Image (cartoon, helix red, strand yellow):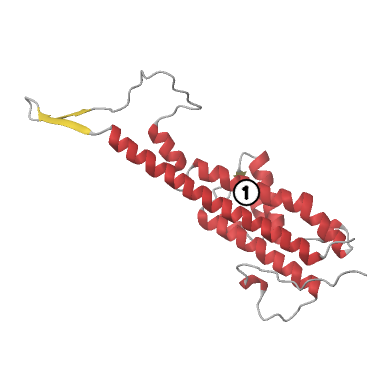
Amino acid sequence: MTEAFDDVIREYIDFVNQQVGAYMDALAGFAGHYARVERQVHRVNRQVKSEIDSAGQQVVVWASYEDPTKPDIIHNRILRAQDYLAANAEGGSNEQQHAKAIVVFLFTYWEDEIRPRLANAKGVAEHEIRCDAMGDLRILRNVILHAKSILRSDKHAELKTLGELFLVDQPIRLSYESMQKIFVVVKQDCGKLLFEWLGVEDALIQTGDIIDIAIQKKPRAPQP
C-alpha cells in the first residue's frame, strides 16, 4: 500500500525536530563542560602567596591541588585546559563538529530515505521532488566531506537559500543563528511541498513565513 505524501513529510519534520533537540542539548553540554573546567582552572591555579621582592616587584606563587603521580588514572585524551576550553567554547570546534554532522545527517536521510518515498507517494520520478533547501544542504554536505569545509566561489554561487550565512573561500562555520536558519528553511520547503501536493495556491500564510510545522490528521476509516 502506497504511503500518504503528508505522512512522509511529517516523518521528516519529526526527524528534523529530533536534530533540533540533539543540537540544543549538545550546546548545553558543551557550555556545562566549559563552565566546569573553567572553575577547575581557577581552583587549581589559586594564588596562595604574594610577596614583594627586593626590587619592589610583586612575586606570585601558584599551587595545585592535583597530584600527577596518583596511580591508576586512565585518560582517553590529554590536552591543556585552555585547549579544552577553546573546544567547548561557544562556536568552538566541538560545536562546529556537531553542527556539521547534523547538516550531513539532514541531507543524507532526506536523499536516501525520504525523497524516494515522496516520489513513490506522488507517483513521479525521484528527480521531480525538489526543494531549494535540500539542494543547499547537498552542496554543504559535499563541501564538508570532500573539500575540507572550504566553500569555494563556484559552490557558494549555487546556494539558493543559505548563501548569506557563509563567506566565499572560507571554512564553513555554523553558528547558532545559522543552524536555526537551516532548520527553518528546511521546514519552509516541507511546507511548500505540502502546499503543492494539496493544490493550495492562496494559503493564509506564505511558506516563507513558516517557522514550524505541525500536521494533524483525522484517523482513516478502516478498510473493508
Circle 1 residue: 102
Residue 167 in view of the camera: no
Horizontal placement of 66 versus 194: left or right?
left
Horizontal placement of 124 versus 62: left or right?
right
Whole-percent x and y of residue 185? Answer: 64, 63
- Name above or below for residue 83 compared with residue 119: above
Whole-percent x and y of residue 11? Answer: 73, 59
Residue 98 in view of the camera: yes
Whole-percent x and y of residue 6? Answer: 77, 66
Query: Helix or strand or loop: what does disc 1 sit on?
Result: helix
Hey, what amino acid is under mark 1? Ile
- Name above or below for residue 201 compared with residue 107: below
Among all residues in the image, which is located at the extreme right?
224
Residue sitting at x 52%, y 58%: 177
Q: In which quarter of the image is the C terminus?
A: bottom right
Horizontal placement of 109 versus 100: left or right?
right
Hey, which quadrant is residue 217 in on the image? bottom right
Whole-percent x and y of residue 170? Answer: 55, 45
